[in-house]
Image (tube, rainbow, N blue to C red):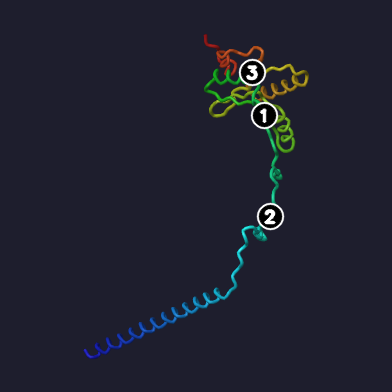
Amino acid sequence: MAWFLLFLLVLAAVIGYFVRDFRRKAAAREAASSNRFAEMMRAQAAAPARPEPSSGAAPTPSPATAAAPQEPAGAKVPGVVTTRPATERFLGQAQTVLYYLLKTGVPELEVFANVSLASVVGAPGSGSEREQQLRRLAQYQLDFVVCDKSMRVIAAVEMESAGGAEAAGAQRFKADCLKEAGIRLVRVSPAAPPRREQIRSLVRGEPVKS
């Protein structure tokens, strides 16, 4: 029993020693921190005050501000091209009439205007020869392309025009390409556009309902 009491006394002494040591070190750290703070305050008070700029004087620009060039008002940004609408209307009057005839005649289909021929028909082969053929196809446009909901091409619709031999050659070339690709080509005269009930027969090849 005596040895147990002795053990408790020794343990209490050790704990008391560590507690006193911790308090002593904490007090020393707090005193050192207070001294550093006091020194900083004395140094700040001893430093000469920076003169405030007068209200009429312009502030001195920083190096970053001075180095940045000032863009003049209305200056163009390099690389940006100033553009404007190519035409007042995306579709001409005759094309607009035909567009709405197609939209109302086959409402379940999708109608696209001014589509590149290269987007509708492909070019066989590979390499540079195929690239040349695709570039040639991209030079031609179709007035309208009609697709189903899965975007499969159903027909191409072209408006007839009296543009001379060059226009006739372009029409023949587009017709030959579409025929080879198995795509129906519909030609419409702007002077005598089809009736709405005739559109389905022209585009889908279905008989006109009486």
Please, what secondary structure does the residue beneath circle 1 have?
Answer: strand
Q: Which is more foreground, mark 3 or mark 2?
A: 2
Q: Pointer 2 and pointer 1: residues touching (CB < 8 Å)?
A: no
* Secondary element at tag 3: strand
Q: Is residue 13 left or right of residue 196?
A: left
Question: What numbered label is drawn on residue 84?
Answer: none
Q: Which residue is mark 1?
A: 116
Q: Where, quadrant-wise, is the N terminus in this rendering?
A: bottom left
Mark 3 neighbour class, 10 Å CA radius: few under 14, some 14 to 19, many 20 or more: some
Q: Nearer the viewer, residue 188 or 100?
A: 100
Q: Are marks 3 and 2 in contact (CB under 8 Å)?
A: no
Label 2, on which residue?
68
Q: What is the secondary structure assignment of the residue under circle 2?
A: loop
Q: Amino acid at mark 3?
A: Val
Indicate which disc residue 186 carries. Answer: 3
User: Looking at the rendering, which quadrant does residue 126 occupy?
Assistant: top right
Question: Can you give x and y, in whole percent of width and height, for residue 183 in the image?
Answer: 63, 23
Q: Residue at x 59, y 70 (%)?
A: 49
Residue positioned 60% across, 21% down in the render: 99
Q: Residue at x 70, y 34 (%)?
A: 125
**Position of 156 compared to 26: left or right?**
right
C-alpha span from label 2 to label 1: 46 Å
